[in-house]
Image (cartoon, rainbow, N blue to C red):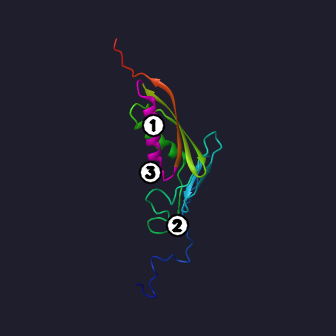
């Protein structure tokens, strides 16, 4: 309860202009962007030879109120680089996968389509390792970003023998 002479701390002062930093603008020189808004849509583009990324985070990230914890409207932007890093990290969690996976991001009907190119350690079973990569990448990207992953195309570009250091 407030008295007539005491301003309500939850109501903004109409005589003071409200200014806040623009946190949704990309950094200087950054040409790729994708974002989700409070409505749950995402869009993005790129001009530097990268992949276009966009998608829909149905209702915001998994388990998070898209209107914010306090009910205030806001925006959430998830850069395509973040999605690529999440996917690459998920690949590293698969036994037999080399840590140098390349990830491309595309969009189809508001969902993400990912393409992962990786090397496996010989003699990793290729089919089961590819299925593990597909499952792990889908789970991690959806869990962390809230985007729906429509497909994950896996290309095994090499089988690498484990190297043993030679002491000579």
Q: Secondary structure at mark 1?
A: helix
Identify the residue at the far bottom of this view.
Answer: 4
Crowdedness near tag 2: few (<14), some (14–19) or many (≥20) residues, C-alpha within 10 Å: few
Q: Which sits earlier in the primary sequence, circle 3 or circle 2?
A: 2
Q: Which sits earlier in the primary sequence, circle 3 or circle 1?
A: 1
Q: Which mark is residue 12?
A: none
Q: Which mark is residue 143?
A: 3
State the separation of the CA atoms marked 3 and 2. 22 Å
Which residue in the structure is indicated by mark 1? 131
Query: Residue 52: x and y, percent?
Result: 61, 45
Which residue in the structure is indicated by mark 2? 73
Query: Residue 17: x and y, percent?
Result: 57, 72
Crowdedness near tag 3: few (<14), some (14–19) or many (≥20) residues, C-alpha within 10 Å: some
Boundaries of the magenta span: 122-148
Crowdedness near tag 1: few (<14), some (14–19) or many (≥20) residues, C-alpha within 10 Å: some
Residue at the image position 43 percent from the left and 59 percent from the top: 63
Q: Nearer the viewer, residue 150 or 17?
A: 150
81 sits left or right of 2 in the view: right
């Amino acid at each position: 309860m407030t008295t007539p002479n005491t301003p309500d701390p939850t109501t903004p002062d109409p005589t003071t202009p409200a200014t806040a930093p623009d946190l949704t603008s990309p950094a200087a020189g950054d040409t790729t962007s994708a974002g989700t808004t409070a409505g749950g849509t995402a869009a993005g583009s790129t001009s530097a030879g990268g992949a276009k990324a966009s998608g829909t985070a149905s209702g915001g990230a998994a388990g998070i109120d898209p209107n914010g914890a306090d009910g205030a409207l806001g925006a959430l932007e998830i850069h395509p680089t973040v999605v690529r890093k999440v996917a690459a990290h998920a690949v590293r969690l698969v036994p037999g996968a080399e840590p140098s996976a390349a990830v491309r991001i595309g969009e189809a009907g508001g969902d993400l389509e990912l393409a992962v190119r990786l090397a496996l350690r010989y003699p990793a079973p290729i089919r089961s390792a590819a299925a593990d990569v597909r499952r792990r990448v889908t789970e991690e990207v959806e869990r962390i970003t809230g985007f729906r992953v429509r497909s994950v195309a896996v290309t095994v570009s090499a089988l690498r023998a484990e190297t043993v250091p030679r002491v000579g």
